[in-house]
Image: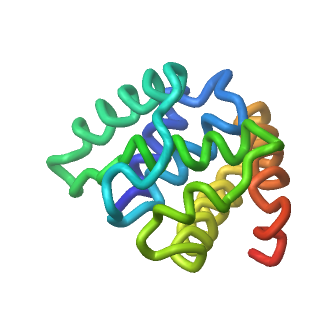
């Protein structure tokens, strides 16, 4: 379902110039299934802009597949985790109704999407490098045990 959206976004060069935190934010939003609204931080202007482009591409694919939820608050959580080395999981997890396990599952799926993008080095070297950097950053601290 979301794999064709990711493919379409790569083809449309939507991620060109996106830093690792933005890329991780979008992948987290795509990887997310459903959660309580308002449990995550606000979205940055850069992420909001890219998320609008992702939504537009998702809508164009809607005759062929159901578009993902694309939760901005989930994207903001991943973006903040990647962009800020001083970010801690304790605050978002204290309000997150499924806690650490649910968040780890979300990030594990995000890591899966980023890992697939990282393999595109031959055709999309900048995007692959950004995904590799996001992978290194997303796994820090308590997330280092994720595959």
Residue at position x 26%, y 51% in the image:
67
Residue at position x 50%, y 42% in the image:
41
Q: Is residue 14 left or right of residue 61?
A: right
Q: Is residue 131 above or below residue 34?
A: above
Residue 34 is situated, as x and y percent measured from the top left of the image, at 33, 65
Q: Is residue 111 above or below residue 87?
A: below
Q: Is residue 39 above or below residue 106?
A: above
Residue 130 is situated, as x and y percent measured from the top left of the image, at 76, 38
1 or 46: which is nearer to us?
A: 46
Number of numbered discs present? Answer: 0
Q: Quadrant of residue 61?
A: top left
Q: Is residue 33 left or right of residue 6?
A: left
92 or 54: which is nearer to us?
A: 92
Tell me which colouring the rendered structure shows: rainbow
User: Which residue ends up furthest to the left in the rendered image?
Assistant: 63
Q: Report whether residue 137 is seen.
A: yes
Placement of the C terminus among the 4 image quadrants: bottom right
Residue at position x 61%, y 35% in the image:
22
Residue at position x 40%, y 41% in the image:
72
Placement of the N terminus among the 4 image quadrants: bottom left
Q: Quadrant of residue 141?
A: bottom right
């Amino acid at each position: 379902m979301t794999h064709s959206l990711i493919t379409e976004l790569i083809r449309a060069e939507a991620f060109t110039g996106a830093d690792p935190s933005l890329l991780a934010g979008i992948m987290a939003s795509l990887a997310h299934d459903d959660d309580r609204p308002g449990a995550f931080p606000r979205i940055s202007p850069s992420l909001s802009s890219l998320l609008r482009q992702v939504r537009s591409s998702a809508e164009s694919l809607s005759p062929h597949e159901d578009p993902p939820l694309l939760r901005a608050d989930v994207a903001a959580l991943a973006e903040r985790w990647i962009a800020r080395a001083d970010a801690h999981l304790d605050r978002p997890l204290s309000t997150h109704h499924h806690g650490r396990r649910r968040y780890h599952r979300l990030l594990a799926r995000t890591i899966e999407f980023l890992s697939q993008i990282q393999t595109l080095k031959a055709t999309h070297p900048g995007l692959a490098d950004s995904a590799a950097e996001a992978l290194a950053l997303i796994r820090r601290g308590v997330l280092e045990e994720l595959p």
